[in-house]
Image: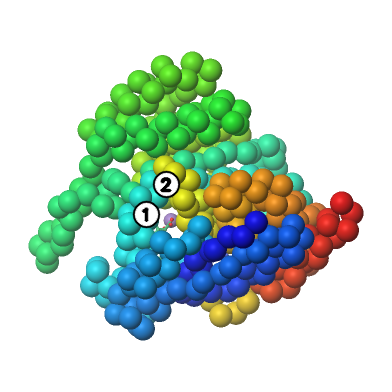
């Protein structure tokens, strides 16, 4: 198969982990005889510096002409004092909105080869396998009015019924392919938008009698995520709650550097990126964990290209590196050898090549 991929490395460790992800993509291409054409574009801080805009028109055109988008991360201290429209994060929000990427899938799994990297007890995390389904193009991030003066500021949490319906439907569909359980997270004891959210979830449930449903308030959900994470299969929630809960859930794996994501439109077109940011504290040092970016490539192969076998190969290769006793410094453990970003990537590629010899 031939596919064209728009690659937007962005800022900080975004560039480092994207380089790793692309090496793994090309290794998959060699192994399974696919051709992946890669076109690189600007987004975020670099785009502001070079083009005066966090999401230049050239980048949108590049993505329009691709089969999928692979993104690193955006942001950095250099741009933190910029006005809102000239912040790197604005580029990310704009690309999500432009392509209507409303369904953000964030899988969280305990990694068998390195369970001990989690600060939580092994018994608590060992059987965790959940999918956080975060609404990505609505809510507080985009609602109007949104403005700040010296004396006050406003953000607006607004959802239409239709916006809620499509993400909830996605969650029920995904649950059917998994263990058949949806947990909807809201704040229906306080927020009007959450009352509508809960109503829509209840209504959609009628179409999915085979799927088990429960509701949790977001504050309690934050607690359960740490005390009893294996109770979750699919978690569906609005934009900001999903943002916060997914970083929290990364603790189950041991590092934010482990979580990949897919942001998908109704027709399957998608953007794939790690959940983490540009990590200015470790950027440029070869310390970044590339697993989240590499696993995001696996999600791209699975969700946009239907290449399930190829996607599983990547996952298995990453997991094997941990089983062989290697990790990056964020996952540092007694008995494991700490590798740099590029050394870890080479190990993943060696595993992929080894798998292919044993086929
Ligand atoms: P962050 O996710 O960049 O980093 C949080 C912590 O996790 C840091 O200590 C960092 O070193 C660590 N970390 C993150 N990814 C890692 C990896 N792959 N390997 C090892 N350690 C890793 O969040 P932050 O520091 O709050 O934000 C930094 C910048 O990134 C901000 O400008 C923020 O807006 C931006 N950001 C961008 C995205 C994105 O592009 N999707 C996501 C989150 C934050
Ligand atoms: C994420 C990030 C973004 C978000 C920021 C950088 C705009 O935190 O992808 O999780 O809040 O969605
Ligand atoms: Mn986030």
In the rendered structure, the answer to whether residue 57 lies left or right of residue 208 reads left
Q: Where on the picture, by quarter, is residue 78?
A: bottom left
Say which quadrant the N terminus sits in: bottom right
Relative height, residue 225 to residue 91 (above, below): above
Label 2, residues with CA under 10 Å away: few <14, some 14-19, many ≥20:
some
Label 1 sits on a secondary structure element that is loop
Q: How is the image coloured?
A: rainbow
281 lies left or right of 137: right
Instruction: Kindly tell me whether residue 285 is visible in this rendering.
Output: yes
Contact? badges 1 and 2 (CB < 8 Å):
yes
Q: Quadrant of ligand 3?
A: bottom left
Q: Which residue is mark 1?
A: 99
In this view, the residue farthest toward the front is: 1
Q: Residue at x 52, y 52 (%)?
A: 261
The residue singled out by tag 2 in the image is 265
The answer to whether 297 appears left or right of 203 in the picture is right
Task: Identify which residue is drawn at 33% across, 72% down.
Answer: 56
């Amino acid at each position: 198969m031939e596919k064209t991929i728009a690659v937007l490395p962005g800022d900080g460790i975004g560039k480092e982990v994207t380089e790793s992800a692309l090496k793994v993509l090309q290794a998959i291409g060699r192994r399974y005889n696919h051709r992946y054409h890669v076109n690189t574009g600007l987004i975020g801080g670099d785009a502001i510096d070079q083009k005066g805009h966090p999401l230049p028109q050239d980048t949108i055109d590049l993505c329009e002409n691709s089969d999928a988008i692979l993104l690193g991360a955006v942001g950095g201290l250099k741009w933190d004092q910029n006005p809102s429209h000239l912040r790197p994060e604005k580029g990310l929000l704009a690309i999500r909105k432009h392509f209507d990427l409303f369904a953000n899938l964030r899988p969280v799994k305990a990694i068998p080869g390195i369970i001990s990297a989690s600060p939580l007890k092994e018994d608590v995390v060992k059987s965790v396998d959940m999918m956080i389904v975060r609404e990505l193009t609505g809510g507080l991030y985009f609602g109007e009015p949104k403005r700040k003066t010296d004396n006050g500021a406003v953000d607006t949490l607004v959802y239409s019924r239709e916006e809620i319906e499509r993400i909830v439907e996605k969650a029920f569909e995904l649950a059917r392919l998994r263990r058949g359980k949806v947990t909807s997270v809201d704040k229906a004891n306080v927020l009007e938008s959450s009352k509508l959210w809960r109503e829509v979830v209840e209504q959609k449930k009628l179409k999915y009698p085979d799927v088990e449903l429960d509701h949790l308030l977001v504050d309690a959900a934050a607690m359960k995520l740490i005390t009893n994470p294996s109770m979750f299969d699919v978690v569906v929630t609005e934009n900001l709650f999903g943002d916060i809960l997914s970083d929290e859930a990364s603790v189950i794996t041991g590092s934010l550097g482990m979580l990949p994501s897919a942001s998908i439109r109704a027709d399957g077109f998608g953007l794939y990126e790690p959940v983490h940011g540009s990590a200015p504290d470790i950027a440029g040092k070869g310390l970044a964990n590339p697993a989240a970016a590499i696993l995001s490539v696996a999600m791209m192969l699975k969700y946009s290209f239907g290449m399930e076998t190829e996607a599983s190969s990547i996952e298995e290769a990453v997991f094997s590196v941990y089983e062989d006793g290697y990790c990056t410094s964020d996952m540092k453990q007694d008995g494991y050898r700490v590798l740099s970003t590029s050394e870890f990537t080479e190990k993943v590629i060696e595993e992929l090549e080894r798998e292919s010899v044993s086929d």
